[in-house]
Amino acid sequence: MSVQVVDLFCGVGGLTRGLLESGLKVVGGFDIDGTCKYTYETNNNIQFHQENIREMTGEEILACYDEGSTKILVGCAPCQPFSNMSFKRFKKKSIKEDEKYDLLLEFGRMIEKVQPVIVSMENVPQIRKMEIFPKFIKILKDNGYFISNNDKGQVVYCPDYGIPQNRRRFVLLASKLGPIELLPPTHKKEEVTIRQFIENLPPVEAGDVCPTDKMHRTAKLSEINLKRIKASKQGGTWKDWPEELRCKCHRKESGQTYTSVYGRMRWDAIGPTMTTQFHCYGTGRYGHPEQNRALTLREGALLQTFPADYDFIDPSVDFVMRDIARHIGNAVPVQLGEVIGLSIKQHLENNNVR
């Protein structure tokens, strides 16, 4: 009997790649975004299925598994409706109107159809505050699953697992075999730094491309932003700049607390969460620790713990930096995917399933 995994909302394969690194066999990835197909298939040699989960019956997923296999279903439904930014900008009522809000329940519907032995769900911690979450838990309970951490799942601090980002994610494991839990932390957070991941890359100027790696390229900086980053200190804020370089909004009293933008990272510390805009200097603390530029696409991918040779550039389409940054920022960190995979493997071994 073989153990096989299908990845829903697979994107470019962050979770899939981590599961493969753990030794699990992934047999299919599903996502509505067809622009992820090249990167997913090229790097993982697994078929990408462009599907809208709302229109799926479950048969498409079942067809990926071999007959008699131990079925595992994993997924990270789009988290934008549940992000901190959404909570700050919109009332909960407005969040529920987001077209992506109920995709977690569509994931639950697929679980009911497929009846996998093990389920893994990853998302942002804020999802637990929404009415949709207990509905998802009820689906799992009604279908005979034991759920990790007493039906609550677990909030993971990424540096505890060697991921160099100030990032918290919610991970829920569920199994029909018995109680299941995520592995305990593998790293001490003070030992995880961005230096370990990006220090040895060749230097590049703002707006340039490394001749040996087309992914190691940066966005251009305006004249004013080039002056600003030159005036920035590692770990500092825009308050380190001369008054004439400060944005108008930051000169107002109401803008004094917004210090997490236009910042440089520190070599010997973790970095910020890699969002879909990590390539933009002004959207966060995405300034390189030493060089006068924002992060390159390759650096963002490495901080998301993708392999150094992961290929994101589809030669059949025009290159658009923001599209690749979106793919990288939306991905599950590969190393978190590996931890999830190792946790599932340990659970299977404990229950004599190999």
Image (cartoon, rainbow, N blue to C red):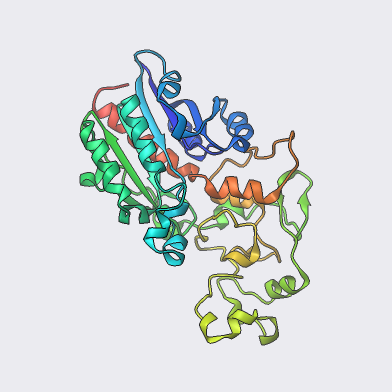
Q: Is residue 345 visible?
A: no
Q: Is residue 83 above or below residue 70?
A: below
Q: In which quadrant is the C terminus drawn?
A: top left
Rendering quarter of residue 246: bottom right
In-front residue for pair 74/97: 97
Q: Give the side of residue 318 with respect to residue 183, left or right.
A: right
* Picture residue at 47% right of the left edge, 62% below the top: 85
* Picture residue at 27% right of the left edge, 41% below the top: 181
Rendering quarter of residue 203: bottom right
Q: Is residue 123 visible?
A: yes
Q: Is residue 240 above or below residue 306?
A: below
Q: Give the side of residue 325 with respect to residue 65, left or right.
A: right
In-front residue for pair 152/107: 107
Q: Residue 239 at x, y = what percent?
A: 59, 81
* Picture residue at 53% right of the left edge, 70% below the top: 260
Q: Give the side of residue 340 with respect to residue 136, left or right.
A: right
Q: Residue 280 at x, y = what percent?
A: 65, 61
Q: In which quadrant is the N terminus drawn?
A: top left
Q: Give the side of residue 40 with respect to residue 60, left or right.
A: right
Q: Residue 326 at x, y = what percent?
A: 59, 49
